[in-house]
């Protein structure tokens, strides 16, 4: 009896068996259409069998095995299988996610006539086509490039260097070496917005190479085509965001993860994977080197590099001779601020205006004000669906929930008492923008946040304005912090940063340090010295003191010291069970049952108490969480596997949903 075992995109941790009289060994890794319920579904064949393990022997027959593209390789299936086991997600959900939507639906893109160069065998002489002469590598860069290839096989390297220290140049040299040997290289970046810029740089360096991009913003057909090109080995370089880690690449020889610390490598829904961690597993599987690059590595990565598990590669200087920006702390405890800005920052902005240079005021909060309030009666703008305030957006006169997207008109009077003098409390980018426009009427003030740069097109237009030197003062969120060159920018002011110092999330200081380093790194390129002014009520805080000295290592070591004492990652391993239900009682009761079930099997694993999540209600659902933690990764993993079996078997009240998040980043 010929049986195929199929991974289907269903929330059930099992495979599905079907009869397939004509199935052959080489069909493993092919997509297949099967009858399921009343309709048809497309899945992936992961195995052949002669007998079914499923109790009901009434197996149905497959509708069709799709033999229109080469089968996915065993390595790809193994990668999906690893994710399924590690992230406790059904294999069918993983394979489905790892395929581009079009292939997932059982379709194929129309194949464009292949360009002539695609037919050419790989390993042409790439060096011959470089037009501008390559910069001479600095010794540290040279050492880094050598280290990547000195050791054969799998090894992880941390390339640590500030913005402008020449990390990208190191990546390009390493890719060059890979191409020269006929290999494929995979490069992951955190943001879709960064791919066009990087693609340009990579394409300019390797004009003869076939480069494929992969990100969720691409049109269906283009994404599917890229996937097939990589799979066929025709694409030599794959550039993409986190989902690119699933691109099949038969001759993969190098993986690069740029800005490896960036939280966007971790997916926050569905398959909650970390692309960086999956990339490391993949490098191990393929027995190839992997380079993690960052100016502010995640503390997990830095810890591994300091303890010798990873190789530390330092790029200690900026490549183009220029100093790091001077970082100054502005103590705002005794100063009366003008709309949140200190005299020193205002003076700094004025002097840049006088000199025709650009400034940036960094405030990581969009909107006009975080809340609208009626002081006499105490009314405040709350979201009906979430336990959160509605943010005032004066630019289009709306109140908006930043969690669920709910919006409403700004009320003319208080809905509770009729008072017409409603007051905005706190400050967002729009308010800062309005203040700056009033204060510096001669300046062109440009706001850059997710509202003003809501589409890639708008974002590109904003970048063009900045590059053309047409903007004098930029007001922006962390959107501006990442990977862009602003040659005229010489002043960065950071306001409202203190909140992250005392946040409930133990990773908040790590993120704040990275953001401030990054945003500061935007200033002072192209021969103009940069200056960073940080307004704070905690001028002596070690985080700011380390920033003054650009001393990531000191900051990292002090944070790691605190984490060691508290038993937080990387000194422990965590998973979070989250539940959402119509009432908090229900959510917590489910978590309590789950905890009870865990007690008998929690060997070497600490179970915490179920608690409401920080954002207690989202989209009308009440949310609770239960943290589990262990000093041993294997202990946690085997516990989770056993626990999941029990959780799947639990009877659940209607409307309750739960998921497990392994290595959670958000608390
Ligand atoms: P990072 O990726 O660390 O921000 P880049 O690799 O982009 O740094 O380098 C910053 C700038 O310095 C780029 O314009 C790059 O072309 C240039 N550069 C890099 N390495 C060298 C070098 N060895 N000599 C001269 N210029 C260099
Ligand atoms: Zn909401
Ligand atoms: Zn009122």
Image (tube, helix red, strand yellow):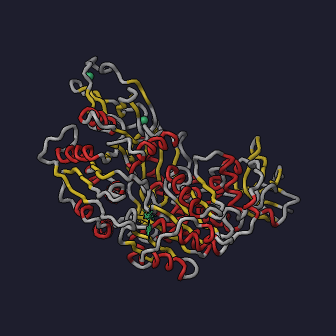
* 60 or 456: nearer the viewer: 456
Judge from the rendering whether residue 443 lies leftward or rightward of residue 62; answer left or right: left
Q: Position of residue 66 (x, y in %)?
A: 80, 54
From this view, report whether residue 130 is shown above or below residue 221: below
The N terminus lies in quadrant: bottom right
Q: Relative to 63, does residue 426 appear above or below in the rendering?
A: above
Name the residue at 40% across, 24% down. Answer: 409
Q: Which of the 4 image quadrants contains residue 511?
A: bottom left
Instruction: Count the marks.
Output: 0
> Where residue 119 appears, x then y in whole percent?
76, 63
**Quarter of the displayed picture in which ligand 3 can be seen:** top left
Residue farthest toward the left in the current orientation of the protein: 334
**Residue 178 located left or right of residue 340:** right
Where is residue 572, by image quadrant?
bottom left
- Front-most of residues 524 and 646: 524
- Residue 139 in the image: x percent, y percent? 42, 78
Q: Residue furthest top?
A: 418
The x and y percentages for residue 656 are: 52, 43
Q: Residue at x 27, y 49 (%)?
A: 493
- Is residue 640 in sight in this rendering? yes
Q: Residue 569: tell me if it is visible.
A: no
Q: Is residue 302 left or right of residue 375?
A: right
Compared to residue 305, the image places residue 624 above or below, namely above
Residue sitting at 42 percent across and 69 percent down? 301
Q: Residue furthest front?
A: 132
């Amino acid at each position: 009896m010929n049986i195929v075992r199929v991974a289907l995109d269903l929330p059930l941790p099992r495979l599905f068996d079907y009869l397939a009289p004509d199935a052959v060994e080489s069909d493993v890794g092919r997509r297949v259409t099967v009858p399921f319920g009343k309709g048809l579904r497309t899945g992936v064949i992961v195995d052949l069998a002669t007998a079914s393990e499923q109790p009901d022997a009434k197996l149905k027959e497959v509708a069709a095995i799709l033999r229109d593209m080469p089968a996915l390789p065993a390595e790809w299936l193994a990668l999906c299988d690893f994710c399924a086991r590690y992230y406790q997600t059904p294999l069918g959900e993983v394979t489905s996610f790892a395929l581009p939507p079009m292939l997932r639906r059982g379709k194929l893109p129309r194949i464009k006539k292949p360009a002539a160069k695609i037919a050419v065998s790989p390993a042409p002489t790439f060096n011959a086509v470089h037009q501008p002469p390559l910069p001479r590598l600095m010794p540290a860069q040279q050492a880094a490039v050598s280290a990547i290839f000195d050791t054969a096989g799998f090894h992880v390297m941390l390339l640590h260097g500030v913005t402008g220290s020449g990390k990208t140049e190191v990546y390009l040299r390493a890719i060059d070496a890979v191409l020269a040997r006929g290999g494929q290289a995979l490069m992951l970046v955190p943001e879709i917005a960064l791919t066009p810029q990087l693609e340009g740089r990579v394409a300019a360096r390797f004009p003869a190479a076939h480069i494929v991009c992969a990100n969720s913003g691409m049109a269906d057909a283009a994404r599917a085509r890229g996937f097939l090109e990589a799979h066929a080995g025709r694409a030599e370089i794959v550039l993409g965001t986190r989902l690119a880690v699933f691109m099949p690449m038969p001759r993969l020889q190098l993986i690069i993860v740029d800005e490896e610390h960036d939280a966007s490598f971790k997916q926050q829904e569905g398959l909650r994977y970390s692309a960086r961690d999956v990339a490391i597993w993949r490098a191990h599987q393929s027995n190839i080197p992997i380079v993690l690059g960052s100016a502010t590595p995640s503390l997990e990565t830095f810890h591994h590099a300091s303890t010798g598990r990873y190789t530390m590669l330092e790029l200690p200087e900026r490549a183009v001779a220029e100093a790091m920006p001077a970082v100054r702390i502005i103590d705002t405890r005794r100063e009366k601020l003008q709309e949140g800005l200190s005299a020193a920052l205002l003076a700094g902005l004025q002097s840049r205006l006088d000199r025709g240079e650009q400034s940036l005021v960094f405030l990581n909060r969009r909107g006009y004000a975080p809340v609208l309030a009626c002081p006499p009666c105490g009314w405040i703008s709350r979201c009906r669906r979430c336990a959160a305030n509605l943010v005032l957006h004066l630019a289009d006169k709306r109140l908006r929930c930043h969690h669920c997207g709910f919006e409403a008109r700004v009320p003319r009077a208080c809905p509770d008492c009729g008072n017409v003098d409603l007051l905005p409390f706190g400050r967002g980018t729009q308010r800062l923008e309005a203040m700056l426009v009033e204060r510096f009427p001669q300046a062109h003030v440009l706001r850059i946040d997710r509202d003003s740069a809501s589409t890639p097109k708008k974002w590109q237009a904003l970048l063009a304005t900045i590059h053309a030197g047409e903007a004098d003062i930029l007001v922006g969120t962390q959107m501006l912090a990442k990977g862009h060159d602003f040659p005229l920018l010489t002043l960065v002011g950071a306001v409202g940063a203190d909140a992250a110092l005392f946040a409930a999330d133990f990773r908040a200081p790590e993120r704040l340090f990275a953001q401030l380093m990054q945003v500061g790194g935007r200033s002072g390129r192209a021969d103009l010295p940069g200056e960073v002014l940080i307004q704070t009520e905690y001028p002596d805080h070690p985080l700011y003191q380390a920033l003054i000295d650009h001393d990531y290592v000191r900051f990292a070591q002090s944070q790691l010291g605190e984490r060691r004492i508290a038993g937080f990652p990387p000194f422990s391993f965590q998973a979070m069970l989250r539940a959402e239900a119509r009432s908090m009682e229900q959510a917590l009761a489910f978590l309590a049952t789950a905890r009870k079930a865990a007690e008998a099997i929690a060997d070497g694993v600490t179970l915490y108490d179920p608690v409401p999540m920080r954002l207690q209600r989202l989209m009308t659902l009440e949310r609770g969480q239960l943290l589990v933690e262990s000093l041993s990764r294997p202990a946690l993993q085997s516990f989770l596997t056993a626990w999941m079996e029990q959780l799947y078997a639990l009877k659940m009240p209607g409307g309750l949903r739960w998921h497990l998040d392994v290595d959670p980043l958000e608390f």
